[in-house]
Every structure is written in structure tokens, then in C-alpha cells.
Image: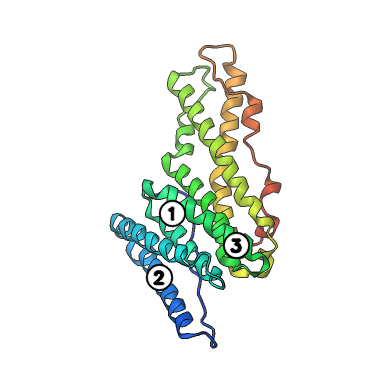
Amino acid sequence: MKNSNIRFVVPFLVIFLLGCATAKDVQLATDLIRTDNELTRLLVEVRPGDTESAAVYLSGLAVQAKKEADELNGVPGKERDAIAYYRIAATAYWRSGMTEDVNPLFEVVEKGSQLCIGLKDQAPDRDCLFLRLVIPFAGLEAKAEEKDLSKLLDDVNFNDNRRTEKEIETMQEISTSLNQSKPLVQKIFNEGADERFKSHSGMRAYYCNNAKKAKDYYFPVAALFGTKVREFDQNLSDSSPPLGITVESADSLIIPDSEFPSFCQGEN
């Protein structure tokens, strides 16, 4: 959740007040807008220049948003407000980058998602779509921050008919990382099947932007990894130590281009 070569964009959603709302409803909506605005301020103004301070503030904001959401959860007619607070909490937990915020992130996403399911077609589209995407986004971003897989692969060369213990370890490490990242990328792509993206141009653009980032991160690494495995198979398959990775297993890490949502092809 720190600086990396894959950075997902977070949408900032505007909450509109209804003219017929009661004073209590207006206050609730005002508090929700204020909390959402504070999230935006921390992400846009504070975090780029002071990551450590922003992390503390974001974690605190997440705790408060979760508290508000939990209090509204179960109150008839307040499900949409609770979902909005859960979305704010999820975003703040994610962007705080704190290890201790991982479990609360899963908790608020689960609670918000359950409310979305309960509301069915009355669920707020943008908040609920974001809650379905935040876990794979956060997971893939965290994997990318662990290490630069492309750089590691650049240090592996099996065409010289030699292999080192370090190269073998590097390939096995990358294999593990790709196996963990692949389902996250596929989860992101699979969400593109949601029909609501067709009617929400802003959310569609946001989704496609991030889906493309996931593709641009994963596809080249998986392809290059497969090439390196083939190089070993062709030049050093009878040598020791063995690579421990077959061409077939490397090929299984490739995600077909057809899985990338077709409606994102024309998005910038």
C-alpha cells in the first residue's frame, strides 16, 4: 500500500440531499458529505506530500466511518447511508497502508457488500461496485509493491547455458507471486460483466482505467516469465538444480486477452 508502479485511482462520490428530507436526515447527509470531503482532502492534498501523517489520519477516519456505518447498519431506511460510510472506511483503510488495517478492511467490505445484496436493485450502484472492487485492487497493488517482478526477471538469463541458485530462487519467487496475483486480476476482469457499467459512464471509465493498469502490470510479467521457463527447458532441463517449474505451469499463468472486458477497449 505504499509507492509502486501500479497505483489504482479512487473515485470520489458525491452524495445529494433530498429536498423532502427531515432535519435529522439532512444532518446525517451533511455529516456524510463532510466525511467524504475529508477523505478526498487527505488523499489529494495530504497523502502525496506526507505519506506517514496521511496514513495516521486515514486510519483514524476509517475507524470513525466504520463506527458510523455500524451504528446505521440495521436501521430501516438507512442502509444506503451505511453503505456509503462502509465505502469511505474501506477506502481509508486501504489507503492508510497500515498492516493492522488489513483485517478491518475486509470487515467493512463484507458488511457493506451484504447490505448491497440485501437492497438488491435499490442498492447504490457506485458505492456497491466500488466495494466489490476494493479488495482485488488493494491486493494486487500490495503484490506490486512487494518487489519489481520485471526487474527481477531482467536478471535471469538461461540462454547462456548456465543457471545459478539465485536465478532458480528468483524464478520460484516470481512463480509464487504470479500465482497469487492471477486470481486478483481475474476478479477485476470478471467484475466487468456487471451490466451497471453500461449505464454509469463515470464508473465505467474509472473501472476501465484500473482494469487496464492491472492488465499492463500482470500480462507482460506473466509472458516474460513463460519465456524464461522455456529458455530453461530448452537449454538446461537436464541440469541440476532443477527449476521446479514446468512450461505447462508457466503457460497456465497466462490470462487470455479475451478475459479483458471488451467494453474497455475503447476507453482511455
Q: Position of residue 52 (x, y in %)?
A: 29, 54
Q: Position of residue 86 (x, y in %)?
A: 48, 62
Q: Quadrant of the C terminus?
A: bottom right
Image position, residue 209 (x, y; %): 56, 59
Residue 106 against residue 220 in the figure, above or below: below
Q: Residue at x 54, y 41 (%)?
A: 181
Q: Residue 116's image quarter?
A: bottom right
Question: Where 116 falls versus 78 (above or below)?
Answer: above
Residue at the front extreme, as displayed: 75
Can residue 165 be seen from the camera position used here? yes
**What amino acid is at disc 3?**
Cys
Q: Amino acid at mark 1?
A: Trp
SS label for mark 2: helix
Q: Residue at x 68, y 46 (%)?
A: 257
The mark that comes first in sequence, 3 or 2, is: 2
> Residues under labels 3 and 2: Cα distance?
20 Å
| Badge nearest the viewer, 2 or 1 | 2
Q: Who comes first in sequence, dot 2 or dot 1?
A: 2
Numbered circle sitting on residue 116: 3
Image mark for residue 35: 2
Left or right of 74? Residue 120 is right
Tell me which corner region of the image, top left, top right, bottom left or bottom right, holds residue 220. top right
Q: Which mark is residue 94?
A: 1
Looking at this view, is 75 or 156 the one in front?
75
Q: Foreground residue, 163 or 253?
A: 253
- The three-letter amino acid code for the residue at tag 2 is Thr
Q: Nearer the viewer, mark 1 or mark 3?
A: 3
Question: Left or right: where does residue 184 sit relative to residue 85?
Answer: right
Q: Tell me the element at label 1.
A: helix
Mark nearer the N terminus (1 vs 3): 1
